[in-house]
Image (cartoon, grey):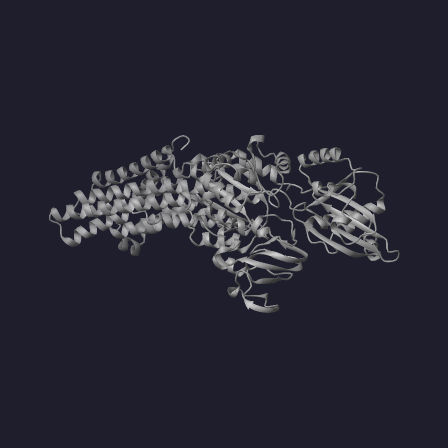
């Protein structure tokens, strides 16, 4: 992540020192230097602008705002942002770890990832079972020595029990299932960097997602111009074209020019530009949030001023004939319907070049109403999340009224007291902010540290949190979340490095696909864990009894190796076809599942011991029967753990049948192929006995508890 942050900066920059422009290494940049800004440059430090000419900066990586910001003198220029157009000079104020980008790097440097819930469960389970197995093995070793068995025999007995008890194969199965899930997700354009994230998304409680580009298309479409008075088509066309930069620098200006081309023609738009030349370029006013240009007709010398920007800023510079009350009323209704708004005004005459003088008594033309269409797949994806018990929190840089309208359009459940804005949250005490974060459904204009607070508040409540993001400002929240998801092709390297999953397409539907896949792999792991319980109980039971009461072992180390490294991994492939439950469950393995698996495992162990102690013949023959029963009994166990015969028939799953046949084939090889019989010390017996043992093993598949 730190390397990704470093790559966002070039190694050299131009500064003005003692009146001369010179190139220096960025590491030599110090507060007080005058940094020369040029197009395409990524700023290496924080500063304040002393000069700015047509300067626009892309701050989306830090602020999340998709629209480029036009800069003027005294505006901030932050590290990690990129100059899109124009030039300027900035006085450096903060460098290195003290800068905006550096502060994020400083936190990431000491930030540790949070392991997924299942990974914590697996680590704890394996650790406990490992320590218990060592303790039991040590007890068996001491018991055998005390009863006169030799050192070698006691060691073999204790190691056999330890091998039987330690579930060393489950981490392998765990990794295998998650790898299969990651492969399936990759086909849908979802790249998984951290395998446990797949499982985490299957149990996620809350998804915190961006609005623009994720829930919506991220394309601003000028839908209409709400008329503010009788304006001729010629004046309207001029104002629309002249209010934009000669070369469009953002999505809104591109949309305005596309609207003009559709309404008239591309030739008409180009003709306006050919006949006029730019005379005065008044840059974006960061306080009133508007900009304007003065153009002059080449032939007549007639001048025309075009202004566009925030409605309040434009109206403040219009004449008394503008009906402000009526205009603002219309604007409020448009904002409530989810539109982004700009005001449009013009003036004709002679202009002096004095901005305050030229921008007086303009005539208001109308309100530009922009729509950011919602993605067609989002409403269905929202319903799917709700059906699966996953809550959605929408984060946006828009006005709350606009966000509220978008939430209505995508049918995101929310109420008026679940809407919060970043500036308002700053005014609340820490305890009340935490309550707001947990309660809220829509959050507008959150700062990076507030996104981090949001994730922390939800996790403190015990929720499993997924966070989406694409900018440097999202890196901290992505890192802290249980599942960090980097969104879209525009995502920064820092966001992708901090996230556990990368969606190549900025589409919320992809997250729902990943949730379904996560629930499917969880179901697979639950089945596999149940099989693990049923598989190990008879092995541990037989190994314990033979160590305590028998002079000759039933299960030898070679048998344990056969069961642990061949039978179990082969059987585990049965459970890679898990199904996604209708609603998620926080419980990894339920009580009924544990009881059912324990009953099957205990019964198999009892049958094996009964065969050994109850049948006639030599110890080698009876031991072979018990060992073969243990192998063939796994056919019934895996069928039961897969849901039973009825579910297998219903789902038409071939893997349980195919794996059962493989286990029967393995058993026949052990009995009827001399080389295997010799290696594994298995006696030969007739086909009728073998068939009976296979039938007993298969019968265990009938033991399935309801809703297990």
Q: Quadrant of the C terminus?
A: top left
- Indicate the quadrant where residue 34 lies: bottom right
Return the residue nearer the eye: 50 or 477: 50
Residue 385, percent from left and from top? 54, 37
Residue 610 appears in view: yes
Left or right of 677 on screen, residue 256: right
Depicted 48 relative to depicted 686: above or below = below
Return the residue nearer the eye: 413 or 653: 413
Residue 272, percent from left and from top? 83, 53
Left or right of 111 on screen, residue 373: right
What residue is shown at x 77% (from left), y 35% (from top)?
323
What residue is shown at x 30% (from left), y 54% (from top)?
676
What residue is shown at x 29% (from left), y 37% (from top)?
602
Residue 471, percent from left and from top? 55, 51
Residue 664, percent from left and from top? 36, 46
- Count of numbered tags: 0
Left or right of 234 on screen, residue 686: left
């Amino acid at each position: 992540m730190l390397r990704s942050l470093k790559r966002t900066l070039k190694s050299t920059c131009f500064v003005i020192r003692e009146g001369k422009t010179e190139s220096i290494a960025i590491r030599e940049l110090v507060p007080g230097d005058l940094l020369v800004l040029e197009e395409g440059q990524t700023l290496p430090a924080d500063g304040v602008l002393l000069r700015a000419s047509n300067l626009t900066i892309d701050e989306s990586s830090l602020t999340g705002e998709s629209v480029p910001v036009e800069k003027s003198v005294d505006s901030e220029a932050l590290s990690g942002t990129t100059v899109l157009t124009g030039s300027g000079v900035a006085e450096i104020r903060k460098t290195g770890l003290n800068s905006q980008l550096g502060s994020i790097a400083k936190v990431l440097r000491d930030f540790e990832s949070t392991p997924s819930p299942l990974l914590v469960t697996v680590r704890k389970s394996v650790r406990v079972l490992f320590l218990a197995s060592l303790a039991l093995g040590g007890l068996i070793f001491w018991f055998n020595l005390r009863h006169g068995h030799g050192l070698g025999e006691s060691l073999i007995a204790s190691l056999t029990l330890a091998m039987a008890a330690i579930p060393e194969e489950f981490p392998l199965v765990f990794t295998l299932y998650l790898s299969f899930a990651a492969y399936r997700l990759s086909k849908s354009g979802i790249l998984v960097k951290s395998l446990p994230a797949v499982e985490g998304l299957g149990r996620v409680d809350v998804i915190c997602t961006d609005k623009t580009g994720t829930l919506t298309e991220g394309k601003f479409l000028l839908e209409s111009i709400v008329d503010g008075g009788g304006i001729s088509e010629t004046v309207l066309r001029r104002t629309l074209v002249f209010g934009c930069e000669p070369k469009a620098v953002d999505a809104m200006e591109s949309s305005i020019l596309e609207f003009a081309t559709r309404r008239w023609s591309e030739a008409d738009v180009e003709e306006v530009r050919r006949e006029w030349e730019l005379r005065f370029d008044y840059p974006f006013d960061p306080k009133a949030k508007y900009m304007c240009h003065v153009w002059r007709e080449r032939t007549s010398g007639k001048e025309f001023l075009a202004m566009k920007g925030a409605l309040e800023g434009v109206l403040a510079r219009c004449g008394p004939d503008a009906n402000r009350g009526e205009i603002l009323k219309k604007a409020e209704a448009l904002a409530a319907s989810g539109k982004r708004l700009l005001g449009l005004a013009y003036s004709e005459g002679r202009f002096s070049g004095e901005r305050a003088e030229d921008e007086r008594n303009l005539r208001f033309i109308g309100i530009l109403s922009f729509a950011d269409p919602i993605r067609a797949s989002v409403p269905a994806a929202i319903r799917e999340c709700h059906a699966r018990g996953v809550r959605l929190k929408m984060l946006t840089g828009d006005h709350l009224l606009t966000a509220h309208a978008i939430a209505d359009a995508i049918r995101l459940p929310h109420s008026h007291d679940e809407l919060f804005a970043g500036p308002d949250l700053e005014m609340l005490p820490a305890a009340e902010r935490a309550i707001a974060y947990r309660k809220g459904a829509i959050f507008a204009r959150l700062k990076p540290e507030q996104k981090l607070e949001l994730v922390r508040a939800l996790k403190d409540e015990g929720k499993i949190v997924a966070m989406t993001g694409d900018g440097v400002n999202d890196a901290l929240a992505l890192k802290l979340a249980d599942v960090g998801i980097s969104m879209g092709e525009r995502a920064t390297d820092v966001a992708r490095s901090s996230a556990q999953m990368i969606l190549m397409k900025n589409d919320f539907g992809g997250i729902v696909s990943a949730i379904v896949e996560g629930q499917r792999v969880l179901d697979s792991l639950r089945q596999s864990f149940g099989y693990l319980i049923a598989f190990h109980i008879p092995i541990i039971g037989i190994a314990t009894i033979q160590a305590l009461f028998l002079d000759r072992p039933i299960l030898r180390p070679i048998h344990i190796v056969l069961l642990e490294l061949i039978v179990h991994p082969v059987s585990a492939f049965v459970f890679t076809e898990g199904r996604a439950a209708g609603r998620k469950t926080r419980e990894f393995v339920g009580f009924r599942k544990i009881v059912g698996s324990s009953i099957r495992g205990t019964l198999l162990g009892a049958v094996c011991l009964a065969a050994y102690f109850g049948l006639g013949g030599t110890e080698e023959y009876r031991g072979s029967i018990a060992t073969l029963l243990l192998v063939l009994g796994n056919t019934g166990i895996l069928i039961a753990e897969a849901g039973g015969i009825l579910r297998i028939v219903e789902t038409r799953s071939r893997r349980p049948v195919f794996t059962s046949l493989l286990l029967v084939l393995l058993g026949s090889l052990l009995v009827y192929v001399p080389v295997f019989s010799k290696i594994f010390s298995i006696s030969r017996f007739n086909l009728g006995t073998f068939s009976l043992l296979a039938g007993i093993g298969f019968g265990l598949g009938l033991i399935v508890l309801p809703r297990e």
